[in-house]
Image: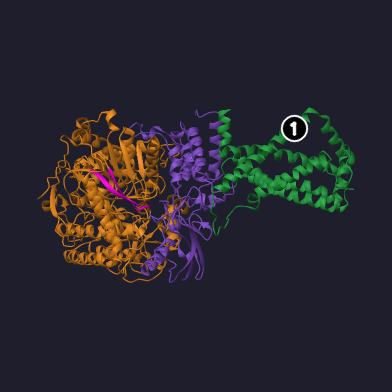
Amino acid sequence: MTLRLDARIPPGSLAEKWNRHRFEMKLVNPANKRRHTIIVVGSGLAGGAAAATMSELGYNVKCFCFQDSPRRAHSIAAQGGINAAKNYQNDGDSIYRLFYDTIKGGDFRSREGNVYRLAELSVNIIDQCVAQGVPFAREYGGLLSNRSFGGAQVSRTFYARGQTGQQLLLGAYQALECQIARGGVTMYPRTEMLDLVVIDGKARGIVVRNLVTGAIESHAADAVVLATGGYSNLFFLSTNAQGCNATAIWRAYKRGAAFANPCFTQIHPTCIPVSGEHQSKLTLMSESLRNDGRVWVSKKPGDKRDPRQIPENERDYFLERKYPSFGNLAPRDIASRAVKEVCDEGRGVGESGLGVYLDFADAIKRLGIDVIRERYGNLFEMYQRITDENPYEVPMRIYPAVHYTMGGLWVDYNLMSNIEGLHVTGEANFSDHGANRLGASALMQGLADGYFIIPNTIGDYLASSKPQKVDTTHAAFKAAEDEVEERTKRFLSIKGKRTVASFHRELGQILWHNCGMSRNEAGLRTALRKIPELREEFWRNVNVPGSDVELNQALEKAGRVADFFELGELMCLDALHRTESCGGHFREESQTPDGEALRDDENFAYVAAWQFAGEGKIPVLNKEPLVFENVKLSQRSYK
Amino acid sequence: MNLTLHVWRQAGPKAPGKMVVYQATDISPDMSFLEMLDVVNERLTERGEVPIAFDHDCREGICGMCSLMINGVAHGPMKGTATCQLHMRSFKDGDTVYIEPWRARAFPVIKDLTVDRSALDRIIQAGGFITAPTGGAQDANTILVPKESVESAMDAAACIGCGACVAACPNASASLFTAAKVTHLGLLPQGQPERYRRALEMVDQMDLENFGSCTLHGECQEACPKEISMDTITRMNRDFIRGRLIGTRA
Amino acid sequence: MGSLRGFYGSMVGKKVVMGVTGLIGVGFVILHSLGNLLVFRGPAAINSYSHFLKSTGELLWALRIVLIVAVILHVIAAVQLTQQSRAARPIAYTKQERQVATVASRTMRWGGALLLVFIVLHILHFTTGTIKPAGVFSPDDVYANMVTSFRIWWVALFYVVAMLALGLHLFHGAWSSVRSIGVSPPSPQPLHHRISLAIALLVWAAFTAVPLAVVAGIVR
């Protein structure tokens, strides 16, 4: 049984689509809005903005987050900035250019209609955020300042020092708190969604666990919005926060929502290298560092000299060499792979050999130490705090790390999944970034979804589907609660020998080596053999201490890791089936003679939407063909 | 390196708590403080004991979820650094380390080292925002903001809401937290219409949440991982006085 | 009236009251300490100064009332704030290391209590003459009252100790009052910090000089 995946892209020219769609959507009478309850899971940019805005419109919103406050969602950690096609710099930017850059950057694996709308709305986002008091950087005259970022040839990135994500999130958080005070939003912090409840084919609520008391509770609604972020933590080591998890989207998948392009993961080139076994997370150094830093390694393999002692002619500035027109600013997937390549050749630096230099010596010579300090001071400090090395004197060492997942639940133009009433926003959906996301575009997508798209499209859904009243006494809620309860008890009853973290670390290793920066059939098959073995051991031998009626962080983690096993397997399956290389998905079997990614548009210009077929069964692959009416598919070249 | 830890253990909000001694052995100086606790917890789990609950999330010093009073200092000995970015190289082999939760009536303990900081959210609810419903904004460049103002606003806006200021304050006052938001929004032209009302409402909420008063010891500014200045408190008081005595019209 | 109650009802409002009344006190002690220095110019100088003050009649009383009200408000607000702050941390830390709090800032409460006791005794001693440690008191001869009292070692010692407390209280109080009432400009090295230090040192030195001079026999 395959799904009918209708993207429901409105007709008309690109520029008309969203406008026209907004007119054609049905509206909910203002007086009726408060009778509709909407559940929003997640309080980051996509969730917080959606909850606040829908409450402003008059809906009755319930918002959930696992952190102790909505202000802590991981959107907060985005450093570099947010793109918008304002063309304030008069450098030739336009909505169409942002659209084109994003489609091309995504290696032509996203929908034209969605991406164009994103570029269109980028403009409104900046206006909205400024009105909220987001302190974006300014010029002396008081106008907004921009920088170029992550592979873009125009300056369209708005930023607030190295804390843009934080400031945007605080804007959304403050709007959300304002609505909480007004009574339009009920906030449930320290609460984790553990199941989705579907009644008559429609998403009607969720089952959650109160992380403080352990109580399993149900919440009913007319529509559910998942804004729960990405699944980079599959890899154990990633730049994501410790709590980031895939449980909400995975539970939805198991209730029938299609999971699209799970193998599209982004590896960010500029992270601080791993220092040891104990490491719990990787720290990203903003991509903006590549504006002034030069990436290099020694020409000789195994060169253990102090970098400052290596003469200029023995250095290989490999990004500048391979990609003369973009140089150190080559897009993330390309830069990451180039780094991996030189490390595989044994030219990596640092004790582990897994790292390359990011050198500011030239920039300091050219611009002076004060300019560099002003631009990157806080990043340099952070680097020094973690590594105990002074980047003003010694080149930084960087290595790629998993950072973002482009894949996610399949959604249509209205951001609704194939389960009616289940909407998915932000990183949790698959929609806008194709096979690779450009820098400073995640914040843009989260806020476009949250502030501008979902508040409109949800009204259309409610007005046209006219959901019947349902409350948590319905049998479906009881059944879901029982399942959650049973699963929780099961974790506690295993009482095995290994900790949750040890399983997670091992899973991460399997995925990083076989489904990381480059993938091949043999490796993926190995992973597909090892993961089920490890999962089987997990369910037999995991040790989850404590009880289920209290704050139990090991129990929370166990549930998340259990889902990572299953999602990890699906990711490898997807990577195995997609025998082309595109964006962040690099199949070694599919490359050009000079080692660049080789797409196969004839066979793979589609969205791979996987459908749960039952425990132990191979998921069903559904294909949504990608239609390109406006852009010509070209080989991505940054040379 | 090896350390002796004295850790506050408390099974639940109402349970009695006490300091318990643990040995942390074979700790690498490259570990972060929280990674050291991870190791301790792994070993506790392997021994069949209940691991120590502590709040943490991003582990890169920005989400504000981590806390901990380390040897009597909020976020530990390194200035301008949250616990998650504190590394074990700041300690010496053989050190004894006291680890306690934030202590304030407004921050009740949930379990072990985790506390409930929702009082800070309620202070924001009282007025820590600019009322700007989605959709009504004019073009961003029509609002001119002097670079100096936006820099000062950003200094205050950098607050991560961790609560270290409260934890470090001898009076358990939330003045720095509240003042940082009053200052961030009060320095921007967009924040002017609600400026005085905001200061009044937030200050009143701070009192309702049972925080203490500010005696200007300066401990908050010292503990703040974002090094927010207590100049913001002067500003908050000024806006409060103006709002109370003259009125909230801007 | 509602807004005044709202004002005082808030902790910030109370701090402002403490700041304003504190600054009144600062002004008073500066003038008082300068006046005391007249003792070094002989009995005539200080006695005529005292006589001049008393001759202002209602003005003197007005000032006295302002001072008394200021002290009362200062003390009431301090007591209330102390109670609120103590209640704000019901469980103390096992270990807490102060990083920057000064001796001055940390002794505001106990030092303040000591000063209150001192002020009462001081008024009973030199203003009303109710307490006569030397057995004599002459309302018209301030100079003699000072010299006879401070020749008694424990009276001199009590004043010297109290003035130490005053100096500390002044140092933290003077600059923090300016901040509490919201008028200090933002700066990492604020000027008012140094001015406060100067005021505290000056007042402490001027007040302490008198009993010490008597003990040392310089003023006799």
Q: Nearer the viewer, residue A629 or A382?
A: A382
**Chain A as rendered: colour:** orange
Residue C166 on the magenta segment: no
Q: Position of residue A296 (x, y in %)?
A: 34, 62
- Please tell me in which quadrant of the rendered image residue A453 appears: top left
Residue at the farthest left position = A1
Q: Position of residue A568 (x, y in %)?
A: 23, 59
Type of secondary structure dominating the magenta stretch? strand
C48 with respect to B230 (left or right): right
Q: Which residues are magenta?
A: A204-219
**Chain B as rendered: colour:** purple
Report which residue position mark 1 lands on.
Answer: C63
Residue at 48% x, 44% y is B156
Q: Element under label 1? A: helix
Alpha-carbon neighbours of circle 1 within 10 Å: few (<14), some, or many (≥20)? few
The chain assigned the colour green in the figure is: C
